Image: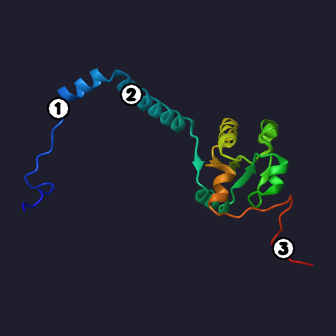
Amino acid sequence: MRPLPQAGRGVSRPRITMEQVFEFAGSHPLLVTALMISFFVLIFSELRRKASGMVAVSPADAVALINNDALVVDLRSSESFMLGHIVNSKNIPFDEFPAKKDTLNKSTPVIAVCDSGISSNKAVAMLRQSGIESAYSLKGGMNAWGQAGLPVVSGKKTKSKGKKS
């Protein structure tokens, strides 16, 4: 029995020449066009996101910001907020947010939270336009927060760390 050849020992790999690449591109113009379009869309969206300064933070990064006194603004409805929210978050429903965004302290980091992270991205754009540079969106919203196993508080009021009477 002859032993099987192993990679790197006398086994030659087929080489792809430029002629073969051009032949493939000529034979499959739709596939190559779709690949190029998706590549440019990816590059364009990443550059646009970087240029706009949008910063979506993971739940773990949000916890670090919260521990450093960031304000959490929950953009969900009051009903959703009462079902469960991040401790010490402030509820400003998204439809009321444009009118109330100027009441936020510009020197305090702000984390905008919604159900999935879509509305919070829009809110962060508004905050940055109004001069709050340290505004962040919770990537994945409350869905990601819950999947990370992080605590939520139910009801309108949260318990304080003060003395019990």
Q: Circle 1 sits on which residue?
A: 17
One can see residue 110 in this view: no
Secondary structure beneath label 1? loop
Q: Circle 3 sits on which residue?
A: 162
Q: Are marks 2 and 1 in contact (CB under 8 Å)?
A: no
Q: Give the side of residue 24 with respect to residue 73, left or right.
A: left
Q: CA distance from mark 3 to mark 2?
A: 60 Å
Q: Disc 1 vs disc 3: which is toward the camera? A: 1
Q: Circle 2 sits on which residue?
A: 36
Q: Disc 3 vs disc 2: which is toward the camera? A: 2
First reached walking from the N terminus: tag 1 or tag 3: 1
The answer to whether residue 52 is above or below residue 105 is above
One can see residue 148 in this view: yes
Q: CA distance from mark 2 to mark 1?
A: 20 Å
The answer to whether residue 33 is above or below residue 53 is above
First reached walking from the N terminus: tag 2 or tag 1: 1
- Quarter of the image holding residue 22? top left
The answer to whether residue 35 is above or below residue 136 is above
Q: Are marks 3 and 2 in contact (CB under 8 Å)?
A: no
In the image, residue 165 lies at what x, y percent?
Answer: 93, 78
Q: CA distance from mark 1 to mark 3?
A: 74 Å
First reached walking from the N terminus: tag 3 or tag 2: 2
In the image, residue 86 lies at what x, y percent?
Answer: 74, 58
Amino acid identity at mark 3: Gly
